[in-house]
Image (spheres, coloured by chain):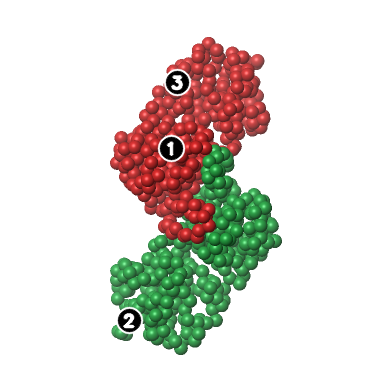
Chain colours: A red, B green
Amino acid sequence: MKSNTYHLHLETESQRAALFHLPESEWLAAAPRHKALAKKLKVTVGWDGDIRDEALKTADFLITNGAPPRDNLRARAPKLKWIQTTAAGVDWLTPLDWLPRDVVLTNNRGAHGPKAYDTVMMALLMLHQKMPALLKHQQAREWRPIYTPPIAGKTAVILGFGDLGEHSGRAAKALGMQVIAVTRQGKPNRHTDRMVKTAQLDRVLPKADYFIVTTPLTAETRGLISRARLNLLKTEASVINIGRSPIIDYEALREKLHNGKLAGAVLDVFDQEPLPADSPWWSTPNTIILPHQSCDDPRYIARLFDFWFANFARFLAGKKLMNMVDRKRGY
Amino acid sequence: MKSNTYHLHLETESQRAALFHLPESEWLAAAPRHKALAKKLKVTVGWDGDIRDEALKTADFLITNGAPPRDNLRARAPKLKWIQTTAAGVDWLTPLDWLPRDVVLTNNRGAHGPKAYDTVMMALLMLHQKMPALLKHQQAREWRPIYTPPIAGKTAVILGFGDLGEHSGRAAKALGMQVIAVTRQGKPNRHTDRMVKTAQLDRVLPKADYFIVTTPLTAETRGLISRARLNLLKTEASVINIGRSPIIDYEALREKLHNGKLAGAVLDVFDQEPLPADSPWWSTPNTIILPHQSCDDPRYIARLFDFWFANFARFLAGKKLMNMVDRKRGY
């Protein structure tokens, strides 16, 4: 290997969704878009660990859709400098105590925003226009108009204002809605009307017509939307979750939907995925189930490679990489 | 009646949807918002013709959700100057040969735009994200993700670019779509990327990922979207109709949806409304039925009265009224 050549290993766990696989064909399609950079790379492609241990012996970089080997990683991968995950959320890799101090972990934050914009907009409108009821009527062959005003002027409270949250906020603003965002820092953002810190969550929940959960799952967000907090929502409010399910007390959420104490929900994430056929969620009133797809674009890996090449150029220039995961915060 | 007082008669056909009724209560709620103007009016409220003939003898103005009496109207209503319809479309009153030359007819064009913006946006996203299939899977309790890219970059061809069409165009642009509008005049509009005349319809139909029908029903638009024109659409294209059903050959449309020659449809209007329970439309594949509500806001009559008062101020000032129906074009 020439001295100015780096070894990149692509590792796929095949049981994960095909959307997140890293086949050689996708790499061969992406590399010509970044010719000069691709020349500096030697690439190996592994599946389910078939060549992983051997590849790690010389790998400088790893892109993976699964968990890297956590035991004694430094010894097994002496040259490893940088791990890129195909996922945006890395909750399933935390705590990051296994990650050698001099190995950078980057996630795929930012890949999901544009699709989230579309999905949140659709979810808001479907809930506001009472589509779950209308679709039930269609099935029953009943012509029953439900007149609703435009959604403009209604209030969206958005938990988390990273890539998904900000795109959700943009969607709500494009519909003329009021946007209140809730984040750790509470830093103002132009896609909101009001930004508050997590400590003020209980004060803004009663204002929500639509409560949108977009945060990553961390020690701080797990269980944050407890039964008591759900009880702060108006009966006319609806919930949209494109984050992670353990952030919300789903048992309490389902009870409230079942008892008409919430108007509706669009849920993309569940404790068990695929959601089993006998889950009560499938038939919960006024609830639309999206099978964990709301923020995923089929051009996902092509875009990940483009992002990785841009980051590789920064690496070569000695610049700080984009999307570095904070070891302590875990996202 | 004082000489500077005018007689306004409100006439409701009660069998029409309650949304379009003109009850005294709505008038009494609206009048205080326009005190000075309301003082110049004497108002009568009639239902199903109960006091209509008597009222017309002295009425200067008529607001009606139904058809005015067409026989010999001038003799029956010697002082009548202006008729306002609650509806935006007046196809059901054409031809306008019954309308005395010196009576102005105004429609409620413009009342439907904001709601149309929401509905068209929702319809585009539901079709693009394959919600009809996903909802079917939910019912069958099947977890089957369907990954779709954001809708940005797809092409909407919009037939008609009045109030409904322009709001549809704005919705498509907010989603990052390309917009081609088709109108009689082909006059450029900032909410489009391209504007063509109806004569060029056949050239742009093959470009549509989404074909949106928003035109009023007139002699020119009836049957415009024939079977041959539907055949110009791509198999992957979907159709949204928020205009009137006789504009499209619905039999051909249904066949194409049934045979997978079109990807989907969202239809708000039908030849027979309410759509009978035995209509094949209820179960046509990839089709969402909206019961003629897509552009209707429950605050409809309150807004109509506000609009009418603004027009009444123009009348008093001797200005040209807004929303005058062209006798020849029929809208």
Residue B177 seen in the figure: no
User: What residue is pinned by disc 2?
Assistant: B5
Look at label 3 and name its amino acid. Leu
Callout 2: residue from which chain? B
- Foreground tag (3 vs 2): 3
In the depicted structure, whether residue A59 falls above or below residue A285? above
Front-lying residue, A267 or A125: A267
User: What residue is pinned by disc 3?
Assistant: A96
Task: Determine the secondary structure under disc 2.
Answer: loop
User: What residue is pinned by disc 1?
Assistant: A214
* Residues beneath discs 3 and 2 located on the same chain: no
Q: Residue B225 placed where, x, y %?
A: 64, 63
Callout 3: residue from which chain? A
Instruction: In the displayed orientation, state which residue is furthest to the top.
Output: A75
Alpha carbon separation for disc pair 1 and 2: 59 Å
In the depicted structure, whether residue B132 falls above or below residue B204? above
Residue at figure coordinates x 53%, y 20% from the top left: A68
Look at label 1 and name its amino acid. Thr
